[in-house]
Amino acid sequence: MDGIVIAIDTREQRPYAFPGAEVKTLPTGDYSLIGLEDRVAIERKSKTDAYGSLGQGRARFRRECERLAQLDYAAVVIEDTLPGFLQRPAHSKMSPASAVGTLLAWSVRYRVPVFFAGDRAHAQALTAKLLHMYAKYHGEVRVEQHA
């Protein structure tokens, strides 16, 4: 798994610290791999951000999921457990059942898995592992297309 460089989107508000990572504007998602930005992306969400994205930011998040669905591999990583996520943030009026239901429905509709990572540290480790797994299984098949 040596030789891969994680790309962090310039708009990421609370970026993870990955050794050797490069900050750049990504077409979609918060994390990718340098040279494979058009093929793989991970979208990071805190619980508060996820509820906001499913409520007021719903249309924008739906468009993000549509873009993620165009990639070879994409995932949403949530920095909470499922039981923790079911405890609605104080500022949100969205029911936890609706929030989880939307995440599950969009996961199936757009074929973008949602991972409840437990906490921020585990979400960072999971993000790195998913990107490394993509590089291991799919990174070497990158072929330039010529018309």
Image (tube, grey):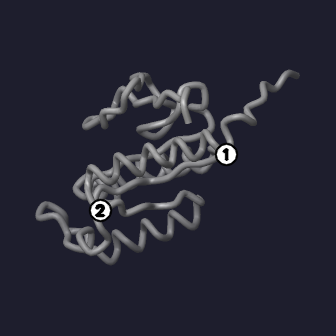
Residues packed near mark 2 inside 10 Å, few (<14), some (14 to 19) or many (20 plus): some
Depth check, mark 2 against mark 1: the one in front is 1
Residue 90 at x, y percent in the picture = 11, 64
In the drawing, does residue 51 fall left or right of residue 92?
right
Secondary structure under tag 2 reads: loop
Question: At 29% across and 56% down in the image, what residue appears?
Answer: 79
**Mark 2: which amino acid?**
Gly
Secondary structure under tag 1 reads: helix
Quadrant of the rendering where the N terminus is positioned: top right
Residue furthest to the front: 2
Question: At 40% across and 30% down in the image, what residue appears?
Answer: 9
What residue is shown with label 2? 118
| Towards the viewer: 11 or 135 | 135
Question: At 25% across and 37% down in the image, what residue appears?
Answer: 14
Please say if 14 is above or below 127.
Answer: above
CA separation in Å, label 2 and label 1: 26 Å
Residue 104 at x, y percent in the picture = 47, 70
| Towards the viewer: 32 or 64 | 32
What residue is shown with label 1? 137
In the rendered image, which quarter is residue 56 located in?
bottom left
In the rendered image, which quarter is residue 25 located in?
top left
Please say if 49 is above or below 88.
Answer: above
